[in-house]
Amino acid sequence: MPDTAILQVSHLSVSFDTYAGKVEAVRDISFALHRGETLALVGESGCGKSVTCRSIMRLLARNANVDAGEILFSGEDLLKKSNRAMRDIRGGKIAMIFQDPMTSLDPTMKIGKQIAEAVRLHRDVSRREANARAEELLSLVGIDEPTRRYHQYPHEFSGGQRQRIVIAIALAADPEILIADEPTTALDVTMQAQIIDLIRDIQKKTGTSVIFITHDLGVVANVADRVAVMYAGRIVEIGLSDEVFYDPRHPYTWGLLASMPTLATDSETLYAIPGTPPTLIHPAPGDAFAPRNPYALEADRIKEPPLFQVSDTHYAATWLLDPRAPKVYPPESIRQRQAAYQKRQEEKEAREHG
Amino acid sequence: MKAKRWVKYICTRLFYMALTLFIITSATFFLMNALPGTPYNNQDRLTQAQLDMLNKKYGFDRPLFERYINYLGNVLHGDFGVSLQFSDQPVATLLSQRMGPSLQLGLQAVLFGSLVGVFLGVIAAMHQNRALDVFCSLFAITGRSVPNFVVAVLLQYIFAVTLKVLPIGLWDDGFRSTILPTLALSISPMAESCRFIRTEMVEVLSSDYIELARAKGMSEIRIAFTHGLRNGLIPLITVLGPMTVSLMTGSLVVENIFAVPGIGEQFTKSILSNDYYTIMAVTILFSALLVVVIFLTDILYQIIDPRVRIEGVQ
Amino acid sequence: MSQISQQLMDDSAFVPAQVRREEAEPELPRALSFLEDSWRKLRKNRAAVVTMILLVIITVLAFLAPVISPYDPNEQHLVWKNLPPKWPGVNISGLNGTSTFRGKQVDNYAMANVPEGTCFLFGTDEFGRDLLSRCLWGTRISLTIAFIAALLDLTIGIAYGLTSAMKGGRTDTIMQRILEILAGIPSLVLVVLMLLVFEPGITSIILAMVISSWIPMARVVRAEALRLKQMEYVQAARALGASEVKIALSHILPNISGIVIVRAMFSIPTAIFFETFLSFLGVGMKIPNASIGTLLNSGYKVFKLYPYQMFIPALILCVIMLSFNLFADGLRDVFDPKMKE
């Protein structure tokens, strides 16, 4: 990995103690976040993407244990920091946006005060300066008449506006990393586009690095520089957006992409991955996706596949990439994608050379 | 439009309050008249002629319905009749003298009880399912289970009889003599608010906006006492009604045990001596208090909670 | 990396796997019946289990009072009056039949010429009656009153609430108005008035208490029934032509039973409190009939001299109240975790 990583997660494993047993929610994952980039974490609900981010923020539930791994932020392991030191990082250096804007704001406090509160937690400023900064943030996230709206309560705003306010709170202390945990899931489609535009816009202005969690690949295509696909607590494929979208290697990614409607899709029915994700209490040996994988090899049942390198930036965890594996053909829609992408690459090269 | 809805709401509520009080007054009146025995304190020594005379004097020889109408009219003018046990004193005067101690005890108990209760409730919620929580919850459930007269007697036994540090009762030692009755009365609001706040806070502390506050980098204590308590306290208003009831109930025995010259002590004295008019007046007074508290609770709740505020009256 | 795997797996593993459907759709654990599930959850709550056992023991002892009480609860031995508790073979002050009199330790049993070997575990009262027997009989009366009152609360509350919810419309509005008015009456004062009018006794105490205590139950039942009425399965039953009565009894009532049970459990300690309170005030059970309240009342009169006569019944009362509350709390966590009040 080049030395531009602002955050380096290595071999992180997180489990939860529940009545039913120990749930291994995140199992040995590693990835890096580079300065100024947007990394998308994609996967079904329960795949561990939120747990990963909550580990970074150290906001895990009380029954969670970090079993192994380290999370390096500017050279220091966040998992070893004291609670007090962690409070300065939370909201100060690393900020987070939550899924449901309808419930993310304190219903009994003026929204301006909620923003100013975040400012004063990390900046040594007077009440008046914090208020001015709050108004500034409100207009930055696109709330009109910030001076008037400063004094309103959350219920006087629409869902999209509330998410803008949540973003304003996150930006209060100019964080270096912004973690967005499904920030558009609870919004309707037009709002989704606006919020994504806003996040991209802010990233351009401030140069913040962003971790964008979503289960919606359609959203990812618009924002992410790189994509990590997660399944059952592991990263199964990670690469540049183009690589994951147009040259996917893991059968799970194939399934995800094939089940996503696109304008180019000509068939009438959408593909659906059969079965349900496994429970992560005593996961069976082998690849957790094998039971749902029509391309599964016997090898998948025996041993979990390691990450195979596809290119400098592209890795996938599937035995299909092993030289001994039989040649398999991805589903039709994936082959169309690959073909379209190859054609585009060739055209690009041709243009560059010619 | 909003103001109009408020006016309509308040008028409806006031009408039902008046109706409730009317029904209670009537029910009390007829119940009292079904009471066996006479209300005169030396009834055994009275001859029939003397009884007739007394009945005539107090108007008990009139037809029931006529007396009922008279009584209703008088009550509307603030005339609750005379006490037959306490040398013909007007009941209104009698009770107004006794209002002070009861009010003082009630307010002290509510203030002290709910402050301690809220504090314990917050601590319990912050340490959900851990030792401190178990301790606070156990305290709350004990407070709910041990009747206040038992608490009162126990306090009296420990602090007045055995240790002799506080007066055993009577209302003659200023603030010192209010300590034990206040403590005894405050147990129930304490337990009630502790349990209530804990439940509310557990819910509030697991909500998304608390998670956001954590993500802002706030400390747990600060979260609990700013965002947490703000949201947990509002519903506490709804227990004001039941709290008033339990205080009234408590005052009946606690005032007796500590010989406090209050309404409760007067009421128990009156029921044991069939003092018609005093019993009726206290019943009406208690009902009026309860009805007003319930009404104020509802109004207050709608004014304070900004979520309900904009929608106005449901 | 493929080097390592080569050592672990031979090439034969690299063939397409057999499709096994059952792996993709893991089998769910066997569904538990409502009772099984509730019992399993309740068993996890240690306080609930302990108090349940305690309550069973107390109830059995109380109802066996005619059989097990050592003396007739109303039999007076005026010479043996106010004897402190004495436990055979126990020599702890307070339990050995002695008391401090004018700074000196005296053996009250010897002074009263009680035959050797006669022990009153809880002592005797001012008329020389055995306090243990009186406590057993008193608990029996207090529990009887509480159980019957709770049962009546339940019946009236369910009937009123269900009727109000199922009829709906004007009937519902009127019934709710009536409830609202009743709720404005301070129940204790009402109960006291009722007891002044009627001859005090078990029946009148129960009736007086029930007059106001069924109101919360009716409200809960109505609210729940209204919610369930909107559910699809009830709509479906209605579409299939089930009568309103049948819907209420066989589709709605079973589904609110949990909440109703919890409420009923909470109304038992309330009833016990009311009974003791009224008797303590002197308007409840009349002496010499023992109930916990009357025992407290007579104990209070002498508690500065003979504190055990007040504190033993008080302790019994507290244990019963605490057990019922803790047990009801446990039940609530099982049946109705959202309930607040």
Image (cartoon, rainbow, N blue to C red):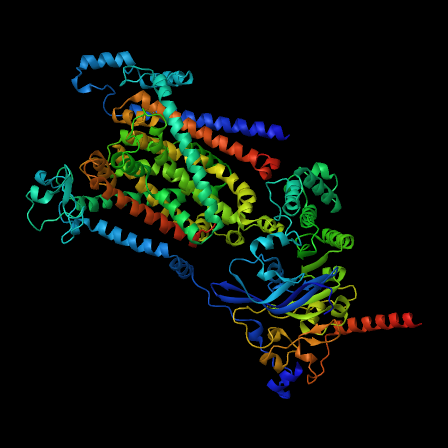
Task: State how many labels appear.
Answer: 0
Q: Is residue C40 above or below residue B150?
A: below
Find residue C11 and report its horizontal and vertical position in percent. Answer: 64, 88
Name the side, left or right, on which B254 lies relative to A297.
left
Name the side, left or right, on which A67 lies relative to A161.
left
Residue A32 appears in view: yes
Q: Quadrant of residue C206?
A: top left
- Work out whether residue B32 or residue C269 is closer to the camera in this orientation and state it: C269
Residue C339 appears in view: no
Name the side, left or right, on which B58 lies relative to C120.
right
- Work out whether residue A317 or residue A326 is closer to the camera in this orientation and state it: A317
Q: Quadrant of the C terminus of chain A?
A: bottom right
Residue found farthest to the right: A354
Q: Quadrant of the N terminus of chain A?
A: bottom right
Find residue C238 and report its horizontal and vertical position in percent. Answer: 51, 51
> Which residue is found at the position 73% from the left and 43% from the top?
A136
Find residue C127 and report its horizontal and vertical position in percent. Answer: 13, 37
